[in-house]
Image: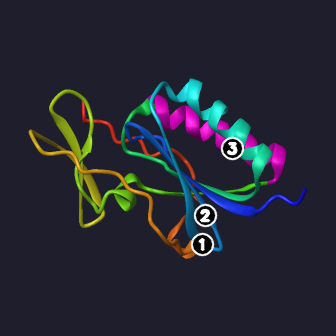
Amino acid sequence: MLRPSVDIIVIPISKPMLVGIYENNRLIKTIKKEGLTSDILPEIFDGLLRDYEIKRIIYAKGPGSFMAIKLAYVFFKTLEITKNIEFLSADGFYFNKNAPIKAVGNSFFVKKDDIISIEKNLKEGEFFLPEKIDISDFSKDTSPLYVLKAV
């Protein structure tokens, strides 16, 4: 059986985790899953690797939960190496219309003029999967985006 060739977008910093399946750059299926990244990522990709020929994986590389970002990065980097799947990224603000992203406590990451900082007592933005994607929007720099408060 011929499996469709697709791109996958994963937003590991959203709750629930969002996974989009794209055929010809258009969203064809959305998966929303609650749980620990370490538990749900392998579960989701077990099915995706069986059902689809994955060309690319694109992920939100941060800022957000450091553990979710680290786990996603290692998981996708492993797939890139072992399955020869292209691995790309964008910062999390790409997937929430540049709205604040939850940090710790009542702190939020904000992005202004390409500078990410931390502010308090804001309203978190909602993450979304774009209906259509342009691969040129995404970067080959997949290193996690950790934004730490100055000590």
Badge 3 marks a residue whose secondary structure is: helix
Tell me the residue at 70%/45% (across/down): 48
Per the model, the C-alpha gap separating discs 1 and 2 is 5 Å
Residue tagged by mark 2? 22
Indicate the position of residue 138 as horizontal and vertical percent values: 53, 66
Check disc 3 and report the residue beneath it.
77
Q: Crowding at label 1, few (<14), some or many (≥20) Cα neighbours within 10 Å?
A: some
Residue 25 image offset from top left, x and y in percent: 60, 72
Q: Which residues are magenta?
A: 67-84
State which mark lies toward you, 3 or 1: 1
Asked if the magenta segment contains residue 73, the reply would be: yes
Could you say which quadrant of the image residue 20 lies in? bottom right
Name the spot of residue 80 as percent of width and height, x first. 74, 49
Q: Quadrant of residue 4?
A: bottom right
Pointer 1 and pointer 2: residues touching (CB < 8 Å)?
yes
Left or right of residue 111: residue 94: right
